Amino acid sequence: MKKRWVEPVILTGEHVILEPLSLEHLDGIIEAVKDGELWKLWFTSVPSPETAETTIKSALDLRENAGWMPFIVREKATGKIIGSTRYCNVDEINQRLEIGYTWYSASYQRTIVNTECKYLLLSHAFEKLDAIAVEFRTHWHNHKSRAAIARLGAKQDGVLRNHSKSADGIYRDTVVFSIINLEWPAVKQSLKFKLSS
C-alpha cells in the first residue's frame, strides 16, 4: 500500500500530547465536551455527548478515505483528554492542508494549550511534511476563533461568502487564513516566544 503524505503520529509538547483519534477515546471526548457544553455554540461544530461516537466514526472515515488526520488533545500532566483537532482538507499533490475542527474544554480555553497545539501541528506540517501552506478556516461570527488564528501569525486570505449551509439551513460565511512556508520561520519564532513567556 502506498504511503500517505500524512501518517499517524504522536506530537508531544511540554503541556499537551496530540494522539491519533480512535474510538477508544469516546468516553474522554464526551467528558471534555461537557466542560462548557461546547456543542451549544451555534457557530461551531463540536459534538454533543450523543453525537460524539458518530463524529469519531466520521473523522476516522475521512482519515481512511481522504487522508485527513484527526487527533485528541491530552493534558500531559494529568493524561486527561481536553479537546480535539485535525489536519483536514489535505491536498497531497499541492502539499497544502488545513488545521481545523479544533475545540478545547472550556477550562482550557485562553490558556497556553492552543498555542502549543498549533506550534506542534505547524512544526510537523512545515518541517516533516514539507507543506507549502497551512490554512485555517472559521465561521465569520466566531470572533474568538478569528482573533486566536490571527494571534498565531496567520494572515487572512479572504472570506468565502455563502460557503456552506448548516443543518438548520443557515448559510455560513467562512473566513480563510493561512501561513505559507516562507513565513514559518518568523511565525515559529513568535510562537516559541509566546510559549516561553
Image (cartoon, helix red, strand yellow):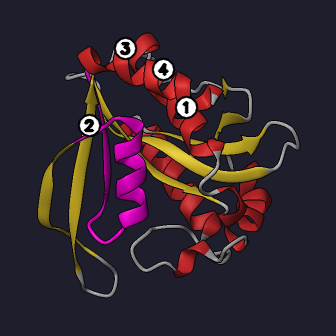
Left or right: 124 with respect to 143?
right
State how far apart marks 1 and 3 are (Cα): 14 Å
State how far apart marks 2 and 1 are (Cα): 19 Å
The magenta stretch is: 132-155
**Secondary structure under the numbered disc 3 in the rendered image:** helix
Lower position in the chain sequence, tag 1 or tag 4: 4
State how far apart marks 3 and 2 are (Cα): 14 Å
Check the picture and name the quadrant holding the N terminus: top left
Residue identifier under label 1: 194
Residue in the foreground of this view, choosing between 195 and 135: 195
**Looking at numbered disc 2 in the image, what kind of residue is underneath it?**
Ser
Crowd rating for badge 2 (residues with CA inside 10 Å; few <14, some 14–19, many 20+): many
Residue 162 x %, y %: 13, 70
**Looking at numbered disc 3 in the image, what kind of residue is underneath it?**
Pro
State how far apart marks 4 and 3 are (Cα): 10 Å
Residue 138 can be seen in this image = yes
Residue identifier under label 4: 123
Residue identifier under label 3: 185
State how far apart marks 4 and 2 are (Cα): 14 Å
* Front: mark 1 or 4: 1
Mark 1 and 4 residues: CB-CB less than 8 Å, in contact? no
Lower position in the chain sequence, tag 4 or tag 2: 4
Q: Is residue 168 above or below residue 143?
A: below
Crowd rating for badge 3 (residues with CA inside 10 Å; few <14, some 14–19, many 20+): few
* Front: mark 3 or 2: 3
Left or right: 183 with respect to 61?
left
Lower position in the chain sequence, tag 4 or tag 3: 4
* Front: mark 2 or 1: 1
Left or right: 166 with respect to 117?
left
Left or right: 113 with respect to 96?
right
